[in-house]
Amino acid sequence: MAKILLVDDEDKFRSDLAERLNLRGYETIEAGNGEYAIKAARSDNDIDVVLLDLKMPGLSGEQTLTELKKYRPAIQIIMLTGHGSMASAMEIGRLEAYAYLQKPCEIDKLVETIEAARKDRPHVMARHEIPLVEKGSIKKWLIGSHNSRPGIIILGALIFALMVLAPSPQRLIEILSTPKTGEITDINVGFSGYRQMENDENIADYYSRKHKMLSTVNDSLGNEVKVPQTPYQVSKKARIMLATLVIAALFWASGAVPIGITALLVGVLMYFSGILKPDDIAKAYAKDAVIFIFGVLALAVAISKTGLDRRIGLLLLGPAKSLPRLMFIFLPLLAMTCSLVSEHALVAFIMPLFMMVYVTTIREAGIKQDKALAIMFALTLCYTANSGGPGSPAAGGRNAIMMGILQDYNIAPTFGEWMTYGMPFVPIMALAIGGYFYLRFRSKLKVTALDVAAVVRKASDQIGPMNRNEYLTAAVLIGVIALWIGASDTFGMGGPIILGLVALNIMRILKWRDITSIHWEVVALYASASAMGKGLAETGGALFLADGFLGILPDFMREGSWLAVATSLFTGLTTNFMSDGATVSAIGPITVPMATISGTHPWMIGFATAFASSFAHMLIIGTPSNAIVYAMAKDPVTGEQLVTLSDFFKHGAVVLVLSFAVLWLWTIFGYWRYIGF
C-alpha cells in the first residue's frame, strides 16, 4: 500500500482529499504546515509521495520542498495550488518537484500522477545513488539491491577476517626469507623490486629498507636498535593485501557498495594495516594512469560540448551502415587502430558517439529505452579496444614492461617483429567479439534497423560547419596525441592530457564546472586498483600468487607451447583483478626465466604473458577502457546506469573464454608454429 503525505493548511480540503485517497487504497498522513511535514518525512521512510500546497503560512510550499529534498532527495513531490502561475511553475521545476497541478484537481488525474511519480521513483533514487531495498524478510534484506547488499558485505568481512587470521603458508615465508643470489633460478626473481635488491638481501629486508619500516628491539645490552621486519611480519601484510584483493573484487563484481566506496576501502585497509607509509599510499593512488583517466574523461566533455565528437564519428564510423558492418568491419578496424594508438583515448572519444547514436536511435524508434543496444555498443567498444593490445609494443605499458624483461636477456624483439607475432591475433579476436555480440543481441534489440554512420552524419549536418571552438579543440587534441606518441616516455600519458585541459580552459572552451562534472567514482576506482597492485607487488603477495599457480602445473605444461598456454591462462585471469602492467611485472620475471631453463624460446612465453594481460574484460578495474565505458554508459534522461557491473562480469567471462580460444588455437598452436621463433 502506497503511503501519501498530504500537506495543506486548509483542514477541510486536506481531510476530504485524504478520505478520497483512502477509498482508492492509499494510506495517508496529514500535515497542516511545512514544519510538521518535514518532521514526518524525516521520521517515516515509507512515505512514497508528498502532495504539497504551494501557498501556506509559515514555511511556503517552495521552502518546504527545498527542505524535504535536502533530507529525502528521492521523495516524489507533487505541488498543488489554487494560485498557479507560470513563474511559480518554473521555480518549482527548478526545485525538482515531480509535477505541478491546479487545485482542485480531478481525483482520477491526481491518482494517475501519483502512480506515475511512484513508477519514476526508482530512477530518482538511482540518480541520487540511493539503494532500493525490498522489505518483508531477512532474505530480502540480505540480498538488498545495487550499492546496498548487506549479505555480501557480511560475507566479505568474514572472508577478510579468515584470510588475515589464518597462519602464513610456509611457501610465502620461504619466498620472503630467501636471499637474492642473482641466478635466474632464484625463487624471488619475479619480485617487483628484484633488480633493486642487494645480493644476499631477502624480500622482507628489502621491503623494510625501501619503505623505512624497521622494528625497534633491545639488543643483548638492553639498547634499542632498528632491525628489518621479519619474514613473518611481512607475510601478514601480504595476506592482508591478498584478502583486500578478494573482497574488493567481490564488492565490485556484486555491487555490494558503491564502487567509489570500495575504492576508498582499499586505501583504508592499506593505511590502517601499515602496508605502506601514508605518502607512498597516496602516490600509489595518484599514478600517471589515474591522471590519464581523469584527463580523458574531462577532454571527452570538451569534445562533446563543441560537437567535435560528431566530426570524429564521421571519420571513424563511416563503414558502420548496418549492424553486420558495425560488428564485422568497424570492430576489426578499431582493434588494429588500438594496436598503434592509445586504446583508452579512442574509447573516450568514441563512447560519447555511441551514446549519441543510442539516444537518437531510440528516439526515432519511438521507445524510451533499449538496454540491449546500450550494452552491445558499450561492451563491444571496450572489449575490441582491449583486444588491440597484442598488436604492437605501442599498445600499452604492459608491452613496454615485457620488452624490458626480454631486454634483460638481450633478446628483445624489434617493433616489427612484435607486430609479426601479435597483429594477426587482433582482427580475428575482434571478429570473434563481433560474432558473439551479434548472435547474442540481434534478436533482443528493440531497434529494428541500425545505421550508425547515417545517425552520425545527420547529427553532424544538424550543427552546420565547424566553428572556431571545434578547430581549437581539434588542434589541442592533435597536440595531445602527438605528445602521447612522441614523448610519452618523458611526460607519461597524464602530462599531455593535463596540458590539453589547461589550454582548453585558457581558450574558454572548457570550464572548471565541466571538469568537476566527470564521474569521479571511476577515477577513484582505477586509483584504488593501482594502489592495490602496488601493495601486492611490494609485500610479495603478487609473487606468491604467481608462484602458487606455476607450482601446480603438471610437468607437460612446464615447457614449449603448453607453458605459453599455462602462462596466458594465469595472466588472463589475474589481469582482471590487477592492472595489466602490475600483472606483467609480477608474472613476466618468473615465466621468462622458466622458458630459458626449459629450452623454450623466451619470446613465446613473453608474448603469451603480455598478450593475455589485455584480457581484462570481466571487471571495470582491469583497464581504463572498461572504467571509461562504465562511466559514460548512463541514460541521459533518467541517469540510470545502462551497463552494470554484472553486465561486465557476465559478458566479460564469455569474451575472456573466446580470447583464450583465439590465443591458443589461432596463435600459439596456429600461425606461431608456421613462422617459428
Image (spheres, grey):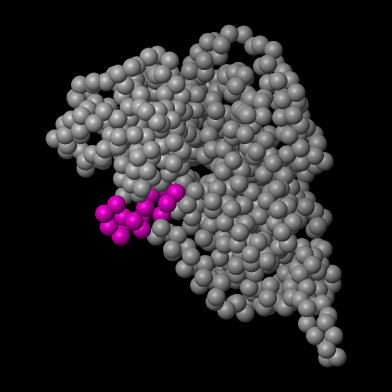
Q: How many marks?
A: 0
Relative image position of residue 526 (x, y in whole percent): 61, 47
Identity of the residue furthest to the front in this view: 57
**Looking at the picture, does residue 450 appear above or below residue 581?**
above
The residue under the point 54% across, 53% down is: 262
Q: Is residue 328 left or right of residue 186?
A: left
In magenta stretch: residue 368:
no
Residue 672 shows up from this direction: no
As rendered, which of 655 and 98 lies closer to the eye?
98
Judged by its main secondary structure, the magenta piece is loop
As rendered, which of 363 and 274 lies closer to the eye?
274
The residue under the point 52% across, 18% down is: 456
The residue under the point 72% across, 69% down is: 188
Q: Is residue 46 left or right of residue 339?
A: left
**Looking at the picture, does residue 206 appear above or below residue 221?**
above
Q: Considering the image in quadrants, where does the N terminus appear?
A: top left
Residue 306 quadrant: top right
Magenta stretch, residue numbers: 135-149
Identity of the residue furthest to the top in this view: 464
Relative image position of residue 384 (x, y in whole percent): 55, 38
The residue under the point 31% across, 55% down is: 140
Q: Is residue 30 left or right of residue 346?
A: left
Relative image position of residue 674 (x, y in whole percent): 63, 47
As rendered, which of 61 and 357 lies closer to the eye?
61
Relative image position of residue 40 (x, y in whole percent): 34, 43
Residue 154 quadrant: bottom left
Residue 652 shows up from this direction: yes
Q: Is residue 79 left or right of residue 342?
A: left
Identity of the residue furthest to the bottom in this view: 220
